[in-house]
Amino acid sequence: MNSPRPLGQPLDRVDGPLKVTGQARYAAEFHQPGMLYGSVISSTIARGRVRTLDTHPAESLPGVRLVLTHLNRPPIAGYDEPYEDADAADGSPFRPLYNDRVLYSGQPLALVVADSEELARYAGSLIRIDYEQGEHQTDLSLVLAEAHEAPAELPPARGDAESALRNAPVRLEPQYETAAEHHNPMEMHASTVFYQVDGSLVVHDKTQGVQNCQRYLEEVFDLKGQVRVLSPYVGGAFGSGLRPQYQLPLAVMAALKLKHSVRVVLSRQQMFTFGYRPRTLQRLALGASAEGRLEAITHHAIGQTSRFEDFTEHEVEWSGMLYRCDNVQLGYRLAPLDVYTPLDMRAPGATIGVYALECAMDELAHAAGVDPLELRLRNYSDLNGNTGKPYSSKALRECYAQGAARFGWTDRAAAPRSLRDGQELIGMGMATGVWEAMVMPASAKACLEENGRLVVSSATADMGTGTYTVMTQIAADAMGLPMEQVEFRLGDSNLSQAPLSGGSATVSSVGSAVLKACELLQQRILDAAQQSPASPFTGLGLEQVGFDGGELFVRSNPQTRASLGQVVQVAGHLEAEASFEAGEARDDWSTSTHSAVFVEVRVDEALGTIRVSRVVSAVAAGKVVNPKTAANQIMGGVVWGIGQALHEETLIDHNLGRYMNHNLSEYHIPVNADIPDMEVFFVEEQDDVVNPLGSKGVGEIGIVGVAAAVANAIFNATGTRVRDLPITLDKLL
Ligand code: MOS
């Protein structure tokens, strides 16, 4: 009864023991005796047609069951009009094995299905493809003039940015470039399709949305009511699992054709053959008063996309909302190339756009002779400039103050190259981070079972983010039960409706549905407790009772109690299902998370090597349900931000039109030795607007601003401003 309520506690992950003992199974770890294995053959050209595809050497190997190509795939009902999944970009989604056309390098052209994975791979190496090669273009910098308006509704221009810029005492017009990055979570994309005797399918897929994959398969393959998708554990995703990836329809095609269970796993190299963070070029112009007050902002971005879809994200909007400025003009264009469509990747858009804005703010601070933190405070805004609406909560000032204090910002020298330690130049930089606090419609079910255990469920996902733990906390807290007595189920398309787990909206959306389902269940429990004639609860409403220590009690007389176990034993299994969606009250407000990131770097003056030596990230994200799992999310984001700043870049050989460093030895990511001690903390906000939990989401905010803070620290250390990411040592020498 006196145990602390679980909400807000830094509890360990409830699924931790299953994961570290190997009991948690991932999409490629489900087996069936006699099942078959597929291996994907990818195109080696970026544009053209398949003239001939010699599959015979592969097919003639004993144990090879099928080589699936556009020529012999089963008819697919949904291929006439490409089906748009819940995260589809504008355009015409890619259809694997649709016809002989090659749209990008790495496109799947065949699937070899065999008795073992090794055999399938070997057989695939024997397939000879003769192409009719077309002229391709994969270099964004060469097609800027051909870019078209992105299908995005940008905030209208306000004021007159052009003339304000002309008249501004301080003015700068920097250009920034960001590199393509590929997701590469530990778990590669995999689909295990169990073909059932009745022809229906049970599919284990690596996804951030089981119901999105279920709907996709039902629609594309005309299998209404015959598909169940499971994904209880996901080994990282970061956006790569928001859309069904091509191994899923390929595995299903093979399973339907052979009437057999099939698994297809992408190789690590093939993880570079679908969505990614697009390469972008950004032009900013900032005009300010002599004191650094913003008088004009223009921000124009051009991103690459495919020829079949317009991948669109929020890249420039942040520049119209983050600071007070009366004259703003934003633009966003897309340049189609012979590449696959980009895809959401952790804090899509903000990672790119806020990087540019926050570097430009640092450049402005330097030009105006104002401390970078002081510059942000002078331009602080309590309104979202794009909408004019106030924030439902915004503790960014506190993030700045507390972050600066913990970091020791006052030790920073304003002039670059002022601090050194032997051969190393030391620099400090900071940046602001921002992300949307979204909610999406979601449902959840709560069941009190006869043994007194509470089982709560929703078709959401846990990509290592902590969903199992946090939902268990929310339910245990609401029902006054110990954590051990509550179980949360997810990753099954049969469960209550849930949105894609993305956009940092899972806790806010599904968590709110869990809360509502628990409140409904409380009513059912009270109703049941009132059934017996001499019930001490007779006549009481829900507001007059409480739930604590596994018991229902009367608030005015806390000794009057009944155990939930007893109530449910008499009444039998009790359950409630509830749906949550954003209320209208939200419309009057702007809802965002914010952060202040402080970074120290050490740059070897002779070698140009860069080391991030300290990071402090202060985050305001409303109510934090679990400070431990939430801090993990922020740490992951900070690590990725360091990667964005210093390491990550997928490079295309434009002669071949192909990503060249498509493996983890040449695609550089930060390793343990690259990551310093970092301090991550939350400035808690009280927010009654965002949702009933007051939570604002912590998945994405951790990365936003980090690359800018690193770049700004490098400038402070060296006096060299590098405006294209990643900042490798050659750019400093
Ligand atoms: Mo996140 S890019 O919405 O997984």
Image: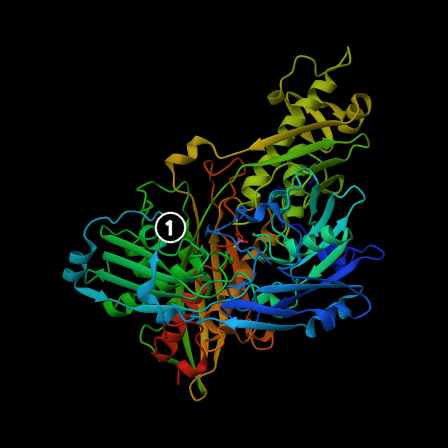
Q: Answer left or right for 725 relative to 25.
A: left
Q: Answer left or right for 92 relative to 272.
A: left
* Residue type marked 1: Pro
Image x and y of residue 182, in percent: 54, 65
- The residue nearer to you, when weighing 271 against 536, is 271
Q: Answer left or right for 149 relative to 31.
A: left
Q: Residue furthest right?
A: 33
Image x and y of residue 435, in percent: 44, 51
- The residue nearer to you, when weighing 9 against 527, is 527
Res 294 → quadrant: bottom left
Which residue corresponds to mark 1?
151
Residue at the spot 66% in from the left edge and 12% down from the top edge: 539
Image x and y of residue 82, in percent: 53, 49
- Please determine whether, in this image, residue 59 is positioned above or below residue 680: below
Q: Answer left or right for 60 relative to 169.
A: right
Residue at the spot 56% in from the left edge and 55% down from the top edge: 95
- The residue nearer to you, when weighing 369 against 703, is 703
The N terminus lies in quadrant = top right
Residue at the spot 44% in from the left edge and 72% down from the top edge: 135
Res 197 → quadrant: top right
